[in-house]
Amino acid sequence: VDLLNSGYNKLAIGFYSNPNLKQVIFPKICNIRDAGFYQCYSLVEIKNSHNIKRLSGSSFLDCISLERIDLSGLTIYDKGVLYGIPNLKEVIVQERIQLDVLTDLTAIYNKRITCTKISKDLVKIKLIDI
């Protein structure tokens, strides 16, 4: 779904229980509502996800195909946002919310977690199966 060309202009975006959704493009700044992509089993790719400024609880719950997400634009991190993404391998976040994200990921997943600073303000978090 290309949100710019589809005419979808709402700030609080959600595609609740859309098992056929494979890709979402965020052309402008937006917020994702609670469980906004819940049960989007086929969601593999999120483009321009740096335009997401706020995610609410369980935004990607049961997005079993999602492996990477760039949340570098995220300014507020709510606990549980990354819950229920079993194949998650990589997250990019601002350094200032890194601790909140790491605390959450550590509580949710039984994986080895590494962090690498990739720019002045950004950190890449990798989740590695044990």
Image (cartoon, helix red, strand yellow):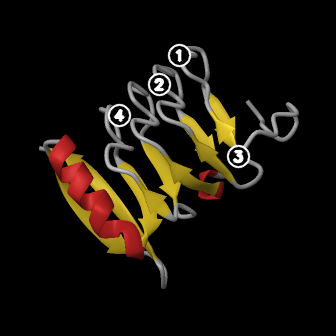
The residue closer to the viewer here, 75 or 21, is 75
Disc 4 to disc 3: CB gap under 8 Å: no
- Under circle 3, the secondary element is loop
Q: Residue at x 34, y 68 (%)?
A: 98
Tags 1 and 2 touching, CB below 8 Å? yes
Q: Residue at x 38, y 68 (%)?
A: 97
Q: Residues within 10 Å of mark 1 (few under 14, many from 20)?
A: some
Q: Secondary structure at mark 4?
A: loop
Q: CA distance from mark 1 to mark 2?
A: 5 Å
Packing grade of label 2 (10 A; few <14, some 14-19, many >=20) is many
Q: Which residue is mark 1?
A: 17
Q: Which mark is residue 102?
A: none
Q: Secondary structure at mark 1?
A: loop
Q: Which residue is mark 4?
A: 85
| Labels 1 and 2: the sequence-earlier one | 1
**Which label sits in the foreground, 2 or 4?**
2
In the rendered image of this protein, does residue 45 appear above or below residue 119?
above
Using the numbered discs, state the Cα–Cα distance from disc 3 to disc 2 in whole angstroms.
Answer: 17 Å
- Disc 2 marks a residue whose amino acid type is Tyr
According to the picture, the residue beneath numbered tag 3 turns out to be 26
Residue at the spot of label 2: 38
Q: Which percent across, then down, holds residue 123?
A: 40, 70
What residue type is disc 4 on?
Ile
First in sequence, mark 1 or 4: give its number: 1
Q: Compare residues 35 and 94 and report the one nearer the observer.
A: 35
What is the C-alpha distance between the residues marked 2 and 4? 10 Å
- Mark 4 neighbour density, 10 Å: few (under 14) some (14–19) many (20 or more): many
Q: Tell me where residue 40 appears, x and y as whole percent.
A: 51, 22
The answer to which of marks 1 and 3 sits earlier in the sequence is 1
CA gap, disc 1 and disc 3: 19 Å
The reply, left or right, for residue 98 in relation to residue 110 is right
Cα–Cα span, label 1 and label 4: 14 Å
